[in-house]
Amino acid sequence: LRAGDLELDMVAHEARRAGRPLALTARELDLLAHLMAHPRQAFTRQELLRTVWGYDVGDTATVTVHVQRLREKTEHDPRAPRHLVTVRGVGYRFDP
């Protein structure tokens, strides 16, 4: 999967930005892969918790924390994300 200078290789289980490897945890990589595989589709935190974590019940703040960490590692400016976008009142989506 690729969007701009962000590249995700699920076979190798690695991510790169501008050709440089990113130090992502397995869960961060799974979350990024899910969002990148469904571009421009908004997901609630609960949907992401169920789909990525496999939890039907749990604290959705986990999703919020992981998205923030992903932004810090993948976005050029985490305070103004271009790819990992917050959809107010819904959750998150990936914009290529």
Image: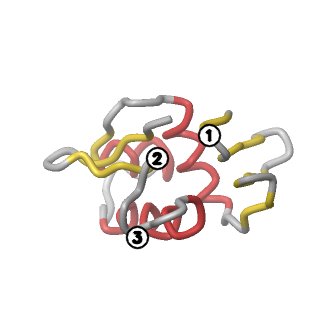
**Looking at the rendering, which quadrant does residue 79 occupy?**
bottom left
Q: Nearer the viewer, mark 3 or mark 2?
A: 2
CA gap between label 1 and label 3 equals 24 Å
Task: Report which residue position mark 1 lands on.
Answer: 4
**Residue at image coords 44%, 66%:** 78
Closer to the camera, 4 or 10? 4
CA gap between label 3 and label 2 equals 16 Å
CA gap between label 1 and label 2 equals 9 Å
**Residue at image coords 44%, 61%:** 67
Marks 1 and 3, the one that precedes in the sequence: 1
Percent x, y for residue 52? 50, 47
Marks 3 and 2, the one that precedes in the sequence: 3
Q: Nearer the viewer, mark 1 or mark 3?
A: 1
Report the side of 91 relative to 64 (left or right): left
**Looking at the rendering, which quadrant does residue 68 occupy?**
bottom left
Percent x, y for residue 43? 32, 39
Task: Report which residue position mark 2 lands on.
Answer: 83
**Where is 13 relative to 23, above or below?**
above
Q: Nearer the viewer, mark 1 or mark 2?
A: 1
Q: Please, what secondary structure does the residue beneath circle 3 have?
A: helix
Percent x, y for residue 8? 71, 43
Closer to the camera, 18 or 2? 18
The type of colouring in the image is: secondary structure
Q: Residue furthest right?
A: 12
Marks 1 and 2, the one that precedes in the sequence: 1
Closer to the camera, 13 or 36? 36
Report the side of 73 relative to 35 (left or right): right
**Residue at image coords 48%, 48%:** 54
Percent x, y for residue 51? 45, 41
Q: Residues within 10 Å of mark 2 (few under 14, many from 20)?
A: many
Q: Residue furthest left?
A: 89
Task: Report which residue position mark 3 lands on.
Answer: 65
